[in-house]
Amino acid sequence: MEDNLIITEAQLRQFTERVFLAIGCSKTHAALATDVLLQADLRGIDSHGVARLSGYVRLWKKGRLNATPEIKVVHETATTATVDGDRGLGLIVAPFAMEIAIKKAAQFGSGWVAVRNSNHFGIAGYHALMAVKEDMIGYAMTNASPLVTPTFSKERMLGTNPMCYAFPAGQYPPVVIDMATSAAANGKLEIAQRTGSAIPNGWVQTAGGLPSTNAHELKQGGSLLPLGGDRQHGSHKGFGLSATVDILSAVLSGANYGPWAPPFVAYLEPHPNPVGEGLGHFVGAMRADGFRPIAVFKEHMDNWIGRFKNAEPIDANQPVIIPGEPERLAEAQRKANGIPLNKLVWDDLKMLADELKINHP
Amino acid sequence: MEDNLIITEAQLRQFTERVFLAIGCSKTHAALATDVLLQADLRGIDSHGVARLSGYVRLWKKGRLNATPEIKVVHETATTATVDGDRGLGLIVAPFAMEIAIKKAAQFGSGWVAVRNSNHFGIAGYHALMAVKEDMIGYAMTNASPLVTPTFSKERMLGTNPMCYAFPAGQYPPVVIDMATSAAANGKLEIAQRTGSAIPNGWVQTAGGLPSTNAHELKQGGSLLPLGGDRQHGSHKGFGLSATVDILSAVLSGANYGPWAPPFVAYLEPHPNPVGEGLGHFVGAMRADGFRPIAVFKEHMDNWIGRFKNAEPIDANQPVIIPGEPERLAEAQRKANGIPLNKLVWDDLKMLADELKINHP
């Protein structure tokens, strides 16, 4: 059973901002980083919200995260750019990059920005949805700490490397496809660990490359598997998607890719011979009206959503879920009733408060 | 056992061109359409090569395919465009669109083209690789006949909707991720049908939405499953990817999306109340040197490829496969030794020759 405490959005927001201010972030940066984390907690993606807060602080303590970065464009064409995040929080570096993409798209129809020298950027959906507010299609991805094996390998070479597409609609809320390219994200393993349950086959393998249903397998040198799980079920596709994220985010930007990607946890050292700088992201925006009039596009998006919602269900009690719908429902619910925090996360935040000498949440 | 005949590339190319000329295509179009189909046969993607030739001819006979289309741009910004394929062969409409994307990318850094009123475009990889030849990152996708169910549904709502990313490298050949977003493409079912073997769980479900290992399930009203297979193994991700392809290719362009997508087989009628025109594609190109100097990008691509090839294998005899590698090896082998054609495909081509009164291959 999960043991949760409830906290209001306002309280959690205030506390999180205090943490970022305490490590030296500017007011603007603290507010933005908080907004990104809170959106994860509000949208029910608990693994990517304040559960990560102490992780960022530990990286800062290690000198791997710069609280006052000078983020800048280092390479540019009319519709492409590369941004150097100066070891800043991905939570603020990625929105900086997305703003450039949106500006380019407003002027030329589309904009694409690769980012290097950054850190964990929270949920991809936050950044992609920035574009949707401007009636654009948003695109966001990041590479991450190596935990996932390519098909046929037992070596951790890739992160859970999420990719996100977000599409504006009319009457309906946006369609948001925000997914790890691994079979399961780490957060799902953590839930199984806490509840002591076995995990499905196809999520992880042992250090030797054998199938496993042990939720603790990663602590014993095992690895996550790409979407598809095994070759027969298309793990080469999950590997291909993950490779795409790695190449766009890091090979293109000048960040560390593959097994060189720096670990999120501060107790693991980054690779001694890096091939680039920090973690990498890739974001993009395309004006929907660069292809057809916006009203027509939105009308057809609504028709698409309505039709898919009504696709004949296998079980009448479980209709088709439109991507982004569960997160939006969680957000409405949590804005009204507060955010449930796992007891371990709550204790972690209290420890953090003591450490930084700020008020508890 | 497969019963194959061997034909040289030159013979097959000559015959295929004769077929396209016989239905009224111009010399240029016949040569281009042939090149796209032959690349599938050469690269070992047998389901998307001349095995489809009679299918195109049947669509033409039905009046659903225009052999002399006036393909044109109907909407445009500096880096985006929408193309109307005038019911032409996707095999020529998609390269037309990709040329526009490449031209825009050359001028502005990136180019993105949505296509409507088209037909089946062959392998996505052909179109994406056009960009790679210009040192650009290539992107190509298409929607397709509805055969795939969303998670929790038993209704065929989506095609196998392939997406392809292609990246130029230096010493190594390009990395080409070209994948159906379903758990398995139709071609794999056809192989199991011919050999009379069962298929793995997670590829198809029955008309009622139950798991099945019957390779003939689709003929009994069953459906293909999205990549991931079931909810627990991430089928919502496969559904999300397929939805992305459907929206970019068809909602954005003005083609038919979801269950309205016209069937490839001529004996099935298109939807009586279409929501758009024909099938849709989406292609794009980004200059790699829009992000960092091309020599540096290629050097790191080579480093990425080399490192992943050497990722520790589970079985020493089965190293990690770089996406695009098997297709490239097949191409070298088939260019040298000829293309093996399945007996059924061979007979189909002979029948086609008789029908069109042209010389047999």
Image (spheres, coloured by chain):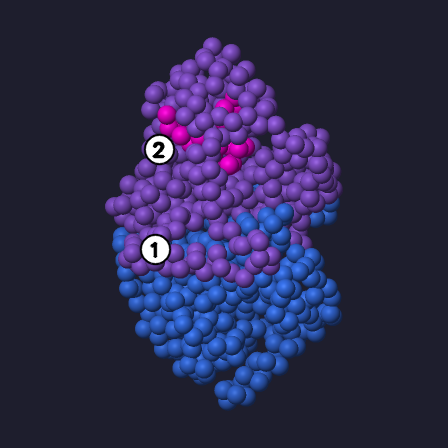
Chain colours: A blue, B purple
Q: Is residue B122 visible?
A: no
Q: Are marks 1 and 2 on the same chain?
A: yes
Magenta span: predominant SS is helix
Where disc 1 sits, the SS reads helix
* Relative to A18, B75 lies left or right: left
Q: Amino acid at mark 1?
A: Lys
Residue A206 falls in which quadrant of the image?
Answer: bottom right
Residue at 41 percent across and 45 percent down: it is B139
Of B129 and A74, the residue lying toward us? B129
Above or below, A28 against B329 in this view is: below
Which residue bears the numbered disc 2?
B96
Query: Does B114 appear in magenta?
Result: no
Above or below, A190 against B178 in this view is: below
Which residue bears the numbered disc 1?
B298
Q: Amino acid at mark 2?
A: Phe
Residue B115 falls in which quadrant of the image?
Answer: top left
Above or below, B235 against B6 in this view is: below
Residue A295 falls in which quadrant of the image?
Answer: top left
x, y (%) of residue A50?
A: 55, 73
x, y (%) of residue B86?
A: 40, 25
Could you tell me how far apart the alpha carbons at marks 1 and 2 are, in whole angstroms?
27 Å
Of A139 and A28, the residue lying toward us? A139
Magenta stretch, residue numbers: B31-55
x, y (%) of residue B349?
A: 52, 20
Residue at 62 percent across and 31 percent down: it is B2
Q: Is residue B229 visible?
A: yes
Residue at 37 percent across and 25 percent down: it is B31
User: Which label number is shown at residue A22?
Assistant: none
Residue at 67 percent across and 70 percent down: it is A216
Where disc 2 sits, the SS reads helix
